Image (cartoon, rainbow, N blue to C red):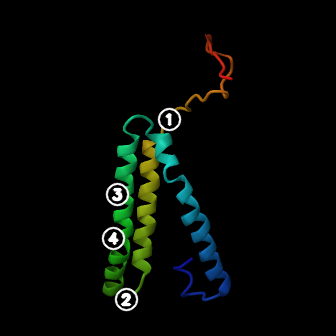
Amino acid sequence: MLLLLPAAPQPLVLYSMVGAQGLLGYGLASVFGAIPAELFQGKRYGTIVGTLNVASNAGAACGPWITGMLYDATGTYGLAFVVAMVMSVVSILAMWIAAPRKVRVVAGRIPRVQAGHAVQELP
């Protein structure tokens, strides 16, 4: 939307950009810890989430600085937006690669007998 805004400076484009930022950007903050918990359960979870948090904050700190350098070099934010989109795709691919390939069994969501094994239900 920000790339479209200079070409079509309409209030609808601006409001769409603000809405997308709110829904997609800030709406994902609530799952920041849940996604690693699903992907990396276990005793090393704290270390993994801490590392991801440091990397995320480093990106948040360096992003405006690198964007400013790209703007100074090119006179436009277009390249910075493209770099941000590419990094978003890299993030999506990394999560896709790290994702578990099997559905984890959760108490209360499995049948009583599965593949010939008795399963005890929890109250």
What residue is at 39 percent from the left and 44 percent from the top? Answer: 46
Say which residue label 1 marks: 101
The quadrant in which residue 18 appears is bottom right
- Residue nearer the viewer, 114 or 60: 60
Query: Regarding mark 3 in the picture, which secondary structure is present there?
Result: helix
Tell me the amino acid under the disc marked 3.
Val
Bin the neighbour count of mark 1 within 10 Å (Cα to Cα): few under 14, some 14-19, many 20 and up: few
Left or right: residue 115 compared with residue 80: right
In the rendering, which numbered label is found on residue 75?
Answer: 2
Instruction: Give the vertical position of 62 relative to 113 (above or below).
Output: below
Q: How much space separates mark 2 and mark 3, taking CA atoms?
A: 31 Å
Distance from the alpha carbon under mark 1 to that under mark 2: 44 Å
> Which-is-in-front pick, marks 4 and 2?
4
| Callout 1 amino acid | Arg
Q: Badge 4 is on which residue?
A: 62
> Is mark 4 in CB contact (under 8 Å) with mark 2?
no
Q: Which mark is residue 25?
A: none
At label 4, the amino acid type is: Cys
Query: Viewer-proximal residue, 107 or 63?
Result: 107
Q: Residue at x 47, y 41 (%)?
A: 39
Q: Residues within 10 Å of mark 3 (few under 14, many from 20)?
A: few
